[in-house]
Amino acid sequence: MKIMDLGHFHHCFVNYHVASEELVSYIPKTYELDLFENRPVVSWVASTLQDVKVFGVPWAIDEMVFSLTLRTYVKKRRADEWIRGILPLSSWMSGKKVPAAFRWIANHKPNDLKLDRSIHFEPFEKSSRGVFEYRWPKTNSDGSNLLRLRTVGVPQPALAGYLEFFTTERYIQLDLDSQKSKGLRFQREPWYLWEIDELVLPETWPGEILPSLKTQKPVFSFVVKGSKTRIDRIKL
């Protein structure tokens, strides 16, 4: 069942390797970790949502929203195929109208994240070089956290066998709060990706779900060019 459309959906991926032991308690019983080169991967995904349209409503929500999600990757055997999907470990979102729509329609309940500074980037239609910059308050201290990424070169399609393809070519998202394996299916055009020549990471990520991320460096980061996306609610 169709639940919403996203008009513009830029993503910034910051990817890490972690130990399987850190993730086991989060995995639904009928699924297992999907590994890249025999290692689990988790990703902080910073997204810019715009032109969100709820199914049955004739207008788009006029609000630009920043979403920050920590996720890992899982799979499940069904007959002669593998179902491969995304498992959110924690999710944060700015704004008011769009988070409310996700809670109501998609049964997705992101934590509130207030931005000190909105996203800034050069229009990709006019430049191959884009700058993403987000600031949000530090917890229990003064100042703010900064996540800043700058793209370089021309966007290229994700290639099978590479980390970019492994993390982006997913069309199903599982519900972390349910063991019934309900999910969301994303339908979109193939994504094009930019490499990054500048990356500034925040001192602390929201929630700090996985202890090892405090000391680890990301294995690879990239930016996904925005595209229209349709979201359907499905049973797996």
Image (cartoon, rainbow, N blue to C red):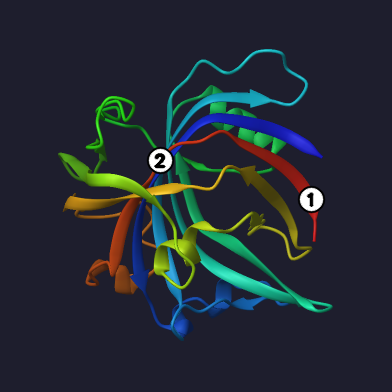
Residue nearest the viewer, comparing 187 with 13:
187
Q: Assign a secondary structure to mark 2.
A: loop
Q: Amino acid at mark 1?
A: Ile
Residue 64 visible, this angle: yes
- Residue at (49% x, 55% y) in the render: 90
Residue nearest the viewer, comparing 155 with 113:
155
Q: Position of residue 133 (x, y in %)?
A: 24, 37
- Residue at (67% x, 72% y) in the render: 28
Residue 140 visible, this angle: no
Q: Position of residue 182 (x, y in %)?
A: 76, 56
- Residue at (46% x, 86% y) in the render: 38
Judged left or right of residue 76, residue 13 is: left
Judged left or right of residue 49, residue 182 is: right
Q: Could you classify mark 2 by the number of other residues whose Cα lies within 10 Å: few (under 14), some (14-19), or many (20 or more)? A: some
Q: Which residue position is annotated with label 2?
A: 225
- Disc 2 from disc 1: Cα separation: 26 Å
Residue nearest the viewer, comparing 72 with 2:
2
Judged left or right of residue 119, residue 184 is: right
**Quadrant in the picture for the N terminus:** top right
Q: Could you classify mark 1 by the number of other residues whose Cα lies within 10 Å: few (under 14), some (14-19), or many (20 or more)? A: some
- Residue at (23% x, 52% y) in the render: 196
Q: Assign a secondary structure to mark 1.
A: strand
Q: Amino acid at mark 2?
A: Lys
The quarter holding residue 218 reads bottom left
**Quadrant in the picture for the C terminus:** bottom right
Label 2 vs label 1, nearer the camera: 2
Which labelled disc corresponds to residue 165? none
Q: Which residue position is annotated with label 1?
A: 234
